[in-house]
Image (spheres, rainbow, N blue to C red):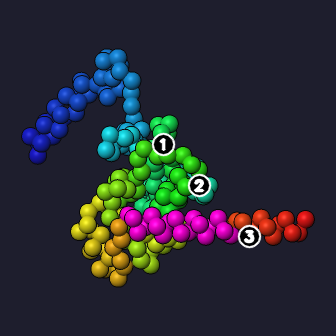
Amino acid sequence: MKRISVLFVALVMLLAACGTKEDVKKAEGTKEVSEEAVKKETKVDGYTLKEPQEDTKCAACDMKVYQKDHNHGKYSAQAIGEDGKNYFFDDLFCLLNYERKSGKKMKARFVRDHNSLEWINVDKANFVKGDIKTPMNVGIASFKTEKEAKVFADKFEAEIEKLSSVDKKAMMRFMEKQKEMKKGNKAQEHEM
């Protein structure tokens, strides 16, 4: 017991002599970067992806974009625009329809892996459509691997879908919304 206490005291003294992380950064003349700030950015396929903040709104529909630690955060998406800006979306369909709605082209598009919550490129993702509660009620979860998608699909009696099929459904929904808006505008014109 005495030997452990001596080792513990020696370890504490050694750590104290080394100084703090901030002291080392000051001595090196480098800027202190908090661990939290590092976690808010990550590189995927050469693009710097960020994490949505508490007040982040969807670029397509202006609804809340959920953070990673929220239950709906696993459905958040983001894209990198031609302008280099990060655009955030509350759901996959908002991401897919944003270019249709805005006319802006995106260099790259990303979704979260349903299991790990890591950002993955939409073009490399595996999609499962089922009775899944998502922010825009589209019922699609994204997975990094085909195996993980299959396990999830089998467990919840859902269907694996290709990006082209998912994008077609997003486009159909977009077109339906456009028709509804036109009908609403015509109804308002008749009321005036």
Is residue 115 visible in this depiction of the protein? no
- Quadrant the C terminus occupies: bottom right
**171 or 86: nearer the eye?**
171
Query: Which numbered disc, 2 or 1, marks the residue that appears first in the sequence?
Result: 1
| Disc marking residue 101 | 2
Above/below status of 58 relative to 36:
below
Q: From this viewpoint, which residue is outermost toward the right?
A: 192
Query: Residue 42 lies in what quarter of the image?
Result: top left
Above/below status of 173 relative to 70:
below
**13 or 151: nearer the eye?**
151
Left or right of 9? Residue 109 is right
| Labels 2 & 3 near each other (Cβ < 8 A) | no
Q: Main secondary structure of the magenta part?
A: helix
Above/below status of 44 relative to 124:
above
Circle 2 SS class: helix
* Residue at the image position 38 percent from the left and 64 percent from the top: 163
x, y (%) of residue 135?
A: 53, 66
x, y (%) of residue 142?
A: 37, 64
Callout 3 amino acid: Lys
| Disc marking residue 81 | 1
Viewer-nearest of labels 1 and 3?
3
Report the residue marked by disc 3: 183
Query: Residue 68 lies in what quarter of the image?
Result: bottom left
Is residue 1 visible in this depiction of the protein? yes
The span from disc 2 to disc 1 (Cα, nearest Å) is 14 Å
